[in-house]
Amino acid sequence: MGDVPALTVQRGVPRVGVLGGIALHDASSVFMPLGPRHVAGLGRVPQAAELSSAQVNEVNTAQLLGAMERVYMRPGSGLEEFVRKMIASGQAANGQPG
């Protein structure tokens, strides 16, 4: 979880959060992880869904890209390698995926 846990996202836009230029009224969704297996989201259409591994990876990536200074991980989560790879690739530094 990043130090900005609730993030605005806009479908088709590679940036996340208000600092990425996605204002609340422009967002297609606002989401916030609640724990290792749950995320809450606000969107235009009510729904409940189970995320695929790829979608979980997208949420984790968005959290990392949206962080201002810190990213927090649950011990034993296995995310340390993922975060280190993102930082090494420069994705976390420029706030945009790939």
Image (tube, rainbow, N blue to C red):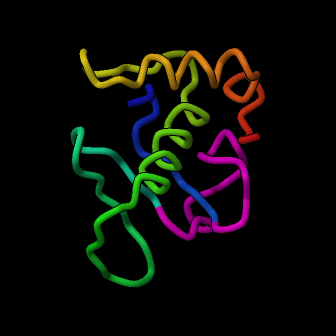
Report the residue at 59% width, 46% height from top.
17
Q: Nearer the viewer, residue 10 or 75?
A: 75
Q: Is residue 96 left or right of residue 38?
A: right
| Figure quadrant of the C terminus | top right
Image position, residue 65 (x, y; %): 61, 34
Image position, residue 64 (x, y; %): 54, 31
Q: Is residue 76 left or right of residue 95?
A: left
Region rendered in magenta: 11-29
Report the residue at 47% width, 56% height from top.
55
Report the residue at 32% width, 82% height from top.
46
Q: Nearer the viewer, residue 9 or 82?
A: 82
Quadrant of the rendered image containing residue 10:
bottom right
Image position, residue 22 (x, y; %): 66, 54
Image position, residue 81 (x, y; %): 49, 18
Query: Is residue 28 on the magenta stretch?
Result: yes
Q: How many marks?
A: 0
Q: Nearer the viewer, residue 75 or 39?
A: 75
Is 64 above or below relative to 16?
above
Query: Is residue 9 on the magenta stretch?
Result: no
Report the residue at 76% width, 22% height from top.
90
Quadrant of the rendered image containing residue 78:
top left
Q: Main secondary structure of the magenta part?
A: loop
| Figure quadrant of the N terminus | top left
Q: Is residue 19 left or right of residue 45?
A: right
Q: Nearer the viewer, residue 49 or 9?
A: 49
Is 37 above or below relative to 75?
below
